[in-house]
Amino acid sequence: MNFQQLKIIREAARQDYNLTEVANMLFTSQSGVSRHIRELEDELGIEIFVRRGKRLLGMTEPGKALLVIAERILNEASNVRRLADLFTNDTSGVLTIATTHTQARYSLPEVIKAFRELFPEVRL
C-alpha cells in the first residue's frame, strides 16, 4: 500500500468514479489508475468499488471505510509536510518597506498587523 493508491481511492470518489478524470487529476494514465486499484484490492483482499463490467459505480462498504481512513492518512501526511516547511523555511530577519505617507497611514496598518501575526520573527 502506498500514498498514490490512497490518492487514487480518494480521487475516484471525488470524480464520481470516472477513472479517466482520476488519471487526469493525478497526472497519470487510466491504465495505471486501474492497476493501482487492482493491486490495492489484491493486497487488502477486499473489493473497494462496486463494478458493472469494467465501470465503477460506487464504493463497497469496506471501500467506504477505507476512504475515511485514506482521507485521514493523506491529511496527516500533508500536515507532516507543512511541519517540515515550518522548520526548513527561514521566516526571520528584517524587512524594510518603502512607501508614501498616504499608504503608510491608511493602507499598510492592516497589512502590517496581519504580516506580524504570520511572521512574528521578522522585524519591520
Image (cartoon, grey):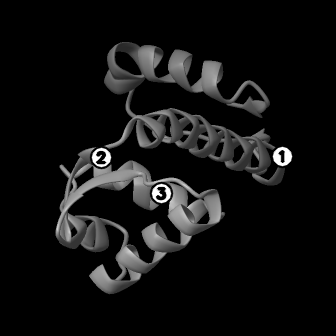
Secondary element at image label 3: helix
The residue lying at 23 percent from left, 58 percent from top is 51
How would you rate the neighbour count of disc 1 (Cα within 10 Å): few for under 14, some for 14-19, many for 20 or more?
Answer: few
Q: Mark 2 or mark 3, which has the lower sequence index?
A: 3
| On-image quarter of the C terminus | top right
Q: Mark 1 or mark 2, which has the lower sequence index?
A: 2
Which of the labelled discs sits on residue 7, or is there none? 3
Answer left or right for 83 relative to 9. Answer: right
Identify residue type, mark 2: Ala
Answer left or right for 84 relative to 5. Answer: right
Cβ atoms under marks 2 and 3 closer than 8 Å: no
Mark 2–mark 3 Cα distance, whole angstroms, equals 10 Å
Answer left or right for 32 relative to 40. Answer: left
Q: Which residue occupies the foreground of this view, 7 or 36?
A: 36
Quadrant in the picture for residue 101: top left
- Residue beneath label 2, please? 13
Secondary element at image label 1: helix
Identify residue type, mark 1: Phe
- Residue beneath label 1, please? 87
